[in-house]
Image (spheres, rainbow, N blue to C red):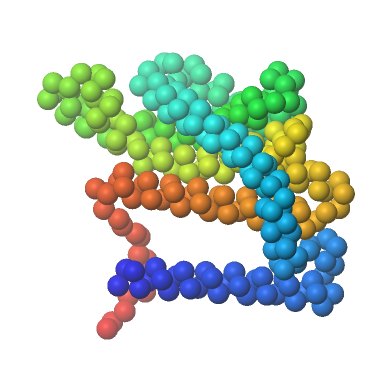
């Protein structure tokens, strides 16, 4: 029954996407909208094929994905560590939380030129920007989870003789892991955004650089091709995270709030 439901949902999604693409194609070809500004699906598909055959796609993809994945890794590790640290040591959290919140309130786009000035136009500045954007998502999720977790769990572990490290590793982190994973999920998109913003500011390769370059020459089909690739990358990364979540939290029962009308049948 579950597989049948998932298959039907997949068909609905595919039908909606196909309808949207068909309308886009018709609108551009018929002149309803200007193809000069929007391009259209068949033209984008041909450009994607040319992009891949030229070898440029793999070059730019490797640069952007390396920056984004490295940023995701460093941002996740530092976010979890800092969130747990501030959550466990309350005074430390009270001192530094307003500072972290204030930095988070500053749009990172405005600080990107500063990071490039500090770390140069190379790989490091993009990774730093992506890491910082991931860090805030993971940190706030972890910090909130640690502060709201059930204290009786920690007390029970202590009564059973568990040390601080054992309690942290076997009680605190597993209890907070669903919220941490939510922060990582939000960080997936942030890592790509950070890498792209860094490439906009200054780079020699990457999808951000390619989009800026194509835009300067009014090559809208290449811009759309890069956007399509980034969409696919986001879908693949989220799918991978879904599979990891299913394996990690196989013990967690699934529930949903059902407030719809009840059937009498």
Query: Is residue 31 shown above or below 254?
Result: below
Q: Nearer the viewer, residue 222 or 115?
A: 222
Q: Quadrant of the N terminus?
A: bottom left
Residue at 80%, 56% (x, y): give it: 220
Whether residue 224 is visible: no
Q: Nearer the viewer, residue 149 or 120?
A: 120
Q: Quadrant of residue 88?
A: top left
Q: Quadrant of residue 123?
A: top right
Residue at 73%, 26% (x, y): give it: 121
Q: Position of residue 218 (x, y in %)?
A: 86, 53
Answer with left or right where residue 112 lies relative to residue 240: right
Residue at 70%, 26% (x, y): give it: 122
Q: Position of residue 104 (x, y in %)?
A: 60, 30
Query: Is residue 121 shown above or below 195?
Result: above
Q: Position of residue 112 (x, y in %)?
A: 71, 29
Q: Quadrant of the C terminus?
A: bottom left
Q: Quadrant of residue 134?
A: top right
Q: Position of residue 137 (x, y in %)?
A: 51, 36
Answer with left or right where residue 2 lies relative to residue 135: left
């Amino acid at each position: 029954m579950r597989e049948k439901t998932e298959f039907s949902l997949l068909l609905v999604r595919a039908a909606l996407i196909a309808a949207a693409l068909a309308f886009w194609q018709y609108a551009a070809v018929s002149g309803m909208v200007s193809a000069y500004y929007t391009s259209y699906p068949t033209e984008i598909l041909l450009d994607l094929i040319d992009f891949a055959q030229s070898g440029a796609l793999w070059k730019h993809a490797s640069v952007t994905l390396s920056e984004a994945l490295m940023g995701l890794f460093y941002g996740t590790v530092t976010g979890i560590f800092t969130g747990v640290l501030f959550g466990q040591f309350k005074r430390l959290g009270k001192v530094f939380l307003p500072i972290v919140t204030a930095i988070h309130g500053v749009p990172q786009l405005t600080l990107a030129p500063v990071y490039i000035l500090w770390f140069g136009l190379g790989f490091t500045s993009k990774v730093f920007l992506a890491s910082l954007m991931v860090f805030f998502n993971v940190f706030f999720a972890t910090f909130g989870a640690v502060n709201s977790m059930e204290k009786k769990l920690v007390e029970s572990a202590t009564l059973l003789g568990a040390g601080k490290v054992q309690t942290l590793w076997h009680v605190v982190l597993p209890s907070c892991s669903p919220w941490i994973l939510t922060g990582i999920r939000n960080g997936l998109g942030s890592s790509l955004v950070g890498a792209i913003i860094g490439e906009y500011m200054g780079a020699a390769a990457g999808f951000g650089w390619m989009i800026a370059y194509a835009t300067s020459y009014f090559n809208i089909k290449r811009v759309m091709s890069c956007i399509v690739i980034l969409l696919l990358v986001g879908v693949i990364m989220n799918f991978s995270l879904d599979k990891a979540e299913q394996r990690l939290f196989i013990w967690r029962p699934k529930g949903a709030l059902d407030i719809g009308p009840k059937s009498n049948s």
